[in-house]
Each structure stands twice: as structure tokens, then as C-alpha cells.
Image: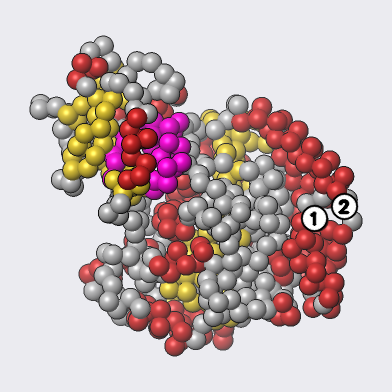
């Protein structure tokens, strides 16, 4: 398997370093399935590439790299498994070093704080169980306190395009590893923007999921109530595939919560008023953002000027309000007993957390609630919001000269998001004249993660044509396959149920499945012998699925695994003329599913041509 050459920037030198073939999940899965690739071969090339990269262009990506023996033990564990059985079979990934990996030290960027966990973080274990292979623990701003990637005793993480510039942080090492082709995806964390700013500065996708969607058990907290695990990937498609495996309710995480999937039903996108946009003197970033607005408009979006003040005011609460006390609550005891173990800038920021009183904390909560209410007026007018991910990018020298001030400006468009319980995807959106990347963020309400990723994929393809810091082209869009999910078959004590309407992910009755412990098995379609009707009545509005002898079409359905103990209570809530019978899927498999009595079609609107209840709702809303 001949190596592909990629460009790696060093200080004043452009070096060619061998790397593995395409690391995109569909390409690796295809190679493993047809035998042209093996996990062992891919991992050996990645390890060689990591060695060469450190030799020629040290970017301080790593805190702990797994040894070859450690990596190959993970590879050997796949020997008895089929690539088709594991959705992330042989997919290499990197873990931010504030997230536990069994038997490997967790430092959080502070050597004196290091400990070796006896088990992996829950989110990491989900990925390992799905066949993913860890390569190491990545560098970060100490205790995830920073947006620059430079606040680390392991060295400042350097930008993948120009090593004299910041990587972004705090998840800098995770982002640069993906951008430079050392891993397919990586895990970061995001409290103030740490999963988005590094994505923008390195031309990759950065998903900041809804709070509680991914377990934070086994993650060193920064602000426990606001922390989330983030995902970096080269494409939105890969990020979505990782999200599908990584997410899930975790009873061991007090902040975990079961979430539905809320679609983006329209394309009215909010843009801050001109006098609220801030580029800190960077005229090129301003120009690039205008271009991103035009591209989203060309994709069918309708820009709506919004008052961004509630979001900016919420952002200031994160470090200027009482939430700084939460950072002190996380590591204050360690700081007090080991003050010299922290970098001076990290210690200065976290020590501020001793000052707010309980009264100040309540006042902050009251202020935040008022800002949420003000934000509701914005969300009543738009489906999503488009902002720059950062207003500019800084050199390492500029950050060193003003470490707190420069860092603060990078949070202008990010610090509000978790306080306001929003989801976001950072998307590559072009390059400055000096070759440094620019990115935008699609912001949506809680649970809109997948809808944002779908739109991010379209905007990404309209904006740039290369992946990360390589010359590898962005691949053409793939047809929508069934989701990669290790749970395609329902367990013996569960019933597989096909739903086609209001019980689907993100729709009004989906909670009836989630509350009963059901989980999604797959997205698919029926055999092409069904008709779909919009039934009268509502809300909630419902469709009726009727099998027909002549005509008909394939209708989009979701198949859910419902615990047998809750089947009775679920069925008792189904109103006439709906019932449960057997539905034939396009695969030829028959499963239990919602069907409608034929008489109900009389006078009902035939919406079979849409092929989907979601598409019908979107057309109706538009």
C-alpha cells in the first residue's frame, strides 16, 4: 500500500510526510470490507506518520502517545470480529487529556494533577466497544481553561497551517491531530468554545453537542454544569457517525439526560446586527463571514437580522459572572495545596472563583434566566443562527504578550452557548490571503444536533474543497445510508417497532418511546407498497400508513427497540384509527409497526409523494 504524500508546514520549511490513505470513516470501512486495508496496516502507517511529524514539525499535539504495543493490542482485539459487526471497526481516534482512557494517565494539562484511571470514561468506552482504536491523549490548555491552546506545560499546541499561530483551545491537540491526518476523529470538551474555536482554526468540523447528550462521567470537570464532550472530524458525515455511537443516557452522570432529535424545519437563519459583529480589526475575517452568509442564502436560507445582545450578555457571565466559581469548585482544593503546579495564567483565572458569594450566584442565575427569555424572542423568528466561530486568529507571540485579553476576544461568539443550552457545529468557511482558515458556527436549539450537522455538510461543501490541513479533496456527498449503529437487532426482551410519524426522533411524541427506555435501531424505509396520508385533527398531527396492492411508495420509518415490559403501556396510548400490525421494510424484513385503518384515508390528504412525514411537515412549514 504506497503512502500518500501530504504537506506539513514547519517553521520556514514545507516537508512531505507519508500518511495513511483516506481516513474518512466510509473509506476505511470500504477498505476493511474488501480486504484492501487492514487495521494493523493503517495503524502502522499512522504511527509512522506521527513519528515523522514530531521529527519534522513538532506541534505539541500529544501529552501521551500510546506505544505501538498498546495500539496493536486494540488492533488484535478486532481479529475475531467482522468489519460489518462493529460500526467503528478499525477507526483511529485521539482523546483530549482531560478524558479518561483506562490504564493511561489523565493529566488535564497539569503533571502534578495526573492520575491513572482504572476504567475509561463512559463515552470512550462506547467508542472502544464499537471497534474504534485509540492512539493517545492530546494536549490542551491546562484544566481546559483557555481558547488558545498555548496554556500548557507540555508546550503550546501549534496551528496545523502555520506553526507561529495558535491552534485554538482548549482542545488544540485533538483538533490538530485530525487536521494533520493523524486520526479520523477526536474527542475534545467544550465549556466556553473549546470544541469549536480549534475546529475553525484548523479547517475541520467541530460538533458541540447539546448538554447531556454525551456522558461526562470520567471527564475532569471545568464547569461541571456546563461541560460537554465534543467531536472533531474532517466531515460532518463522520461527526454524525461518531455521535451516533458516543451518545446515550448515562445514569452515572448526574447531568446526563435523554434527548430526542429535533430537526431544523426551516432555513431562516439569524445574523447579528452589523454593529454587533466584531472582527477585532480583521478585515479578511469580516469579508469571509459575508461570503458565508451569501453561501447559506444560496443554499435556500433566508437571513434575518437579529438582536444579538442577549447572547453577548450571557457570554460575559461565563468569566465575569459567578460561573467562574464553578471552575474553582472543580480544582480549587488541588490549587490550594499545590499552587505552583498550575501555570500562572491558569491559577490567576481559577483563583477568581473564590470571590463570588452565594448571593452573587443566585443573582447570576436570575440574570441568565432573563437573558434566556429575551433570547426566546429571537428564536421565535429564526430556525438557527449563523455567526463567525471566532472574530480573528492570533499569533503565539500576540497571545504571549496579552494572554488573558487575546483569549477573551476568541470567546466573543462562543461563551454563551452552554449557558443558554444550545447546540452548535463549527464549519470550515474559507481562508485568509495568508492561508489561515476561517470558520463559522451554526447554532440551534437544544436537540438540534443532527439537523445542524446535515446543514453543516452542505455549507462545508459550498465553502472549501480540501480536508483539514491536507490537499485531500472533500469527497462528494454520499447517499443517506442506514445509520451505523451496533444495536441493529432488538434484544430478546425488546420489541422492534417501526414508526413513521409523530413518534420519530425530535417529533412531538418521541418522548413516549424515550421515557420507556427505547432506543433507535435504524433509519430505513418501507417496501414500496405503502401510501401515507395526513390525518385530520391535532396537535399532535399524525400520518396514517396503509399497505396497498397497487401503486404506493417507500416511506421513511425509524425502527425502535422497545423493552417488552413497556409495550402494553405504549400500545394503550395509540388512538384510533391507528394500530400496530406488521410492516414490511425495504430489506424484506417484517417488524411491528404503526398502520392505519383503510377507512381513514377517505378525505385525508395523500402525501405519499413526499416519501416522509418529515418532508411533508417541512414543506407545510415553508
Residue annotated with mark 1 = 324
Image label count: 2
In this rendered view, identify the residue nearer to me: 207 or 400.
207
What segment is highlighted magenta in the picture?
496-519
Which residue is the extreme one toward the left? Answer: 549
> From what the image shows, is residue 599 above or below residue 293?
above
> From what the image shows, is residue 209 above or below residue 515?
below
Q: CA distance from mark 2 to mark 1?
A: 8 Å
Quadrant where the N terminus sits is: bottom left
Local crowd size for mark 2, using a 10 Å CA cut-off: few (<14), some (14–19), many (≥20): some
Local crowd size for mark 1, using a 10 Å CA cut-off: few (<14), some (14–19), many (≥20): many
Quadrant where the C terminus sits is: top left
Q: Residue at x 56, y 80 (%)?
A: 104
Residue annotated with mark 2 = 356
> From what the image shows, is residue 543 above or below residue 563?
above
Occupied quadrant, residue 270: top right
Residue 63 appears at what percent x and percent y?
62, 79
Q: Is residue 528 visible?
A: yes
Instruction: Judge from the rendering whether residue 324 lies leftward or rightward of residue 455; answer left or right.
Output: right
Residue 9 appears at what percent x and percent y?
57, 74
Q: Nearer the viewer, mark 2 or mark 1?
A: 2
In this rendered view, identify the residue nearer to me: 8 or 310.
310
The reply to whether discs 2 and 1 touch (Cβ–Cβ < 8 Å) is yes
Amino acid at each position: 500500500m504506497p503512502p500518500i504524500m501530504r504537506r506539513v508546514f514547519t517553521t520556514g520549511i514545507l516537508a512531505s510526510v507519508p500518511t495513511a490513505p483516506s481516513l474518512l470513516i466510509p473509506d476505511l470501512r470500504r477498505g476493511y470490507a474488501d480486504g484492501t486495508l487492514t487495521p494493523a496496516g493503517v495503524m502502522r502507517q499512522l504511527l509512522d506518520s506521527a513519528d515523522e511529524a514530531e521529527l519534522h514539525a513538532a506541534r505539541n499535539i500529544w501529552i501521551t502517545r500510546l506505544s505501538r504495543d498498546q495500539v496493536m493490542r486494540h488492533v488484535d482485539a478486532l481479529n475475531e470480529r467482522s468489519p460489518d459487526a462493529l460500526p467503528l471497526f478499525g477507526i483511529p481516534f485521539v482523546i483530549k487529556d482531560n478524558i479518561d482512557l483506562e490504564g493511561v494517565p489523565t493529566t488535564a494539562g497539569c503533571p502534578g494533577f495526573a492520575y491513572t484511571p482504572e476504567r475509561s470514561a463512559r463515552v470512550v468506552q462506547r467508542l472502544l466497544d464499537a471497534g474504534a482504536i485509540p492512539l493517545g491523549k492530546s494536549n490542551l490548555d491546562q484544566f481546559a481553561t483557555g481558547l488558545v491552546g498555548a496554556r500548557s506545560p507540555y508546550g503550546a499546541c501549534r496551528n496545523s497551517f502555520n506553526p507561529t499561530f495558535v491552534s485554538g483551545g482548549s482542545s488544540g491537540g485533538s483538533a490538530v491531530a485530525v487536521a494533520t491526518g493523524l486520526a479520523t476523529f477526536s474527542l475534545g470538551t467544550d465549556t466556553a468554545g473549546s470544541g469549536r474555536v480549534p475546529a475553525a482554526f484548523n479547517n475541520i468540523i467541530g460538533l458541540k453537542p447539546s448538554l447531556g447528550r454525551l456522558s461526562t462521567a470520567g471527564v475532569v470537570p471545568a464547569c461541571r454544569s456546563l461541560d460537554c464532550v465534543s467531536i472533531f472530524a474532517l466531515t460532518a458525515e463522520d461527526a454524525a457517525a461518531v455521535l451516533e455511537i458516543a451518545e446515550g443516557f448515562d445514569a452515572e452522570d448526574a447531568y446526563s439526560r435523554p434527548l430526542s432529535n429535533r430537526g431544523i424545519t426551516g432555513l431562516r437563519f439569524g445574523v447579528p446586527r452589523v454593529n454587533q459583529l466584531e472582527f477585532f480589526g480583521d478585515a479578511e475575517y469580516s469579508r469571509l463571514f459575508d461570503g458565508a452568509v451569501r453561501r447559506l442564502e444560496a443554499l435556500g436560507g433566508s437571513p434575518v437580522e437579529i438582536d444579538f445582545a442577549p447572547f453577548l450578555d450571557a457570554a460575559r457571565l461565563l468569566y465575569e459572572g459567578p460561573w467562574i466559581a464553578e471552575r474553582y469548585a472543580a480544582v480549587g482544593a488541588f490549587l490550594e495545596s499545590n499552587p505552583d503546579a498550575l501555570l500562572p495564567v491558569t491559577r490567576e483565572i481559577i483563583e477568581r472563583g473564590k470571590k463570588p458569594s452565594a448571593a452573587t450566584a443566585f443573582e447570576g442565575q436570575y440574570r441568565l434566566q432573563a437573558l434566556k427569555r429575551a433570547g426566546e424572542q429571537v428564536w421565535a423568528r429564526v430556525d438557527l443562527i449563523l455567526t463567525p466561530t471566532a472574530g480573528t486568529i492570533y499569533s503565539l507571540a500576540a497571545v504571549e504578550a496579552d494572554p488573558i485579553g487575546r483569549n477573551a476576544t476568541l470567546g466573543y461568539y462562543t461563551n454563551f452557548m452552554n449557558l443558554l443550552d444550545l447546540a452548535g457545529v463549527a464549519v470550515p468557511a474559507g481562508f485568509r490571503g495568508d492561508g489561515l482558515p476561517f470558520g463559522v458556527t451554526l447554532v440551534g436549539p437544544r436537540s438540534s444536533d443532527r439537523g445542524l450537522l446535515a446543514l453543516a455538510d452542505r455549507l462545508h461543501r459550498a465553502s472549501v474543497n480540501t480536508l483539514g490541513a491536507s490537499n485531500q479533496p472533500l469527497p462528494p456527498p454520499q447517499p443517506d445510508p442506514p445509520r451505523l449503529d451496533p444495536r441493529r437487532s432488538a434484544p430478546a426482551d425488546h420489541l422492534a417497532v417501526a414508526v413513521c410519524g409523530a413518534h420519530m426522533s425530535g417529533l412531538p411524541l418521541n418522548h413516549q418511546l424515550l421515557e420507556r427506555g427505547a432506543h433507535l435501531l435504524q433509519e430505513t424505509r418501507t417496501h414500496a407498497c405503502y401510501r401515507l396520508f395526513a390525518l385530520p385533527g391535532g396537535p399532535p398531527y399524525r400520518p396514517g400508513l396503509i399497505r396497498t396492492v397497487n401503486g404506493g411508495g417507500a416511506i421513511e420509518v425509524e425502527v425502535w427497540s422497545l423493552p417488552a415490559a413497556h409495550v402494553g403501556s405504549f400500545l394503550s396510548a395509540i388512538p384510533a384509527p391507528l394500530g400496530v400490525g406488521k410492516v414490511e421494510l425495504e430489506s424484506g424484513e417484517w417488524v411491528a409497526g404503526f398502520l392505519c385503518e383503510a377507512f381513514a384515508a377517505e378525505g385525508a390528504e395523500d402525501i405519499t409523494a413526499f416519501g416522509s412525514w418529515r418532508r411533508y411537515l417541512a414543506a407545510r412549514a415553508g
